[in-house]
Amino acid sequence: MIELYGYPKSTCTQKVKLCLFEKALPFSDRPVDLAKQEHLTPDYLALNPNGVVPTLVHDGAVIHDSSVIMEYIDEVFPDVPMSGRTPVDRARVRAWLRFFEEVPTVAVRIPSFAKVLLKPVEKMTPDQRRANSDKRTLRKGFYRSMEDGISEARHAEAVERLRMTCERMETTLAAEDWLVGDFGIADACVVPTFDRMQDLDLARVWADLPGVGRWWARVQERDCFARTYVAGSRLASS
Ligand SMILES: N[C@@H](CCC(=O)N[C@@H](CS)C(=O)NCC(=O)O)C(=O)O
């Protein structure tokens, strides 16, 4: 029995869905509405004290963090291997995961908040903004840093980091179909960042990188992509 606590527009939830659908594993969706702050309720915090989605519950075991969840799923259900077939490939997969967590996953939040997610905050008084920030468990500092909006310089720096990610991927994808061997968790880790960039009119970031362009076209042809990106999973266009 697999239960996925998540939110359809959450890139971290989408990583896990791509993996579950790729392996054709049945699971029960347990929606946690971030817009209604359901991830900050005592019940959800008891399940995941980080106050973020996703959370996976498998046969009663609670697993946190989207990359950890993808690795867990691949270990427990190895029929469709997604983490590399040799120790060297597995190390390469983990290196991509750490890089994606440190660079593009953090960077893409900036245009996401600038264009869509800050809209409710803009309507709040300064006191309400501070209260809204201070509720966050992991992200208090991040929300505080955006109480007065997002500067152009901060936005530009985030786009620069997204571009650096695409250039790094191009060094592999110029010659390979996937980041490591077959489509796997390294690819699934960064697919939601690309979908979000496209959603936010940032596809120009990789427009001149042919290997990345071919990879993105291949990604969008996969069944797991179609099943993850159903109506209601995009920020700007829903
Ligand atoms: N490292 C965590 C981060 C999860 C995360 O940041 N989730 C976002 C949605 S993609 C969230 O729940 N944000 C809650 C908030 O902004 O208050 C993971 O990968 O699972």
Image: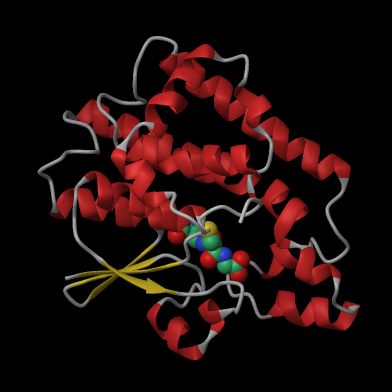
Residue at 20 percent across and 47 percent down: it is 23
Residue at 31 percent across and 57 percent down: it is 69
Q: Is residue 80 above or below residue 139?
A: above
- Colouring convention used in this rendered image of the protein: secondary structure
Quarter of image, res 87? top left
| Quarter of the figure with the N terminus | bottom left
Q: Is residue 179 above or below residue 175?
A: below
Numbered disc total: 0
Q: x and y percent of residue 122 in the render?
A: 85, 68
Residue placed farthest to the top in the image?
175
Residue placed farthest to the bottom in the image?
42
Q: x and y percent of residue 231 in the render?
A: 48, 55
Residue placed farthest to the left in the image?
79
Residue at 50 percent across and 45 percent down: it is 101
Residue at 32 percent across and 35 percent down: it is 222
Quarter of image, res 43? bottom left
Between 139 and 205, the residue placed more toward the observer is: 205
Left or right of 212, for residue 37: right
Q: x and y percent of residue 218 in the render?
A: 38, 25
Left or right of 60, for residue 187: right
Between 95 and 234, the residue placed more toward the observer is: 234
| Quarter of the figure with the C terminus | bottom right
Q: Is residue 191 above or below residue 231?
A: above
Q: x and y percent of residue 203 in the render?
A: 63, 30
Left or right of 221, for residue 210: right
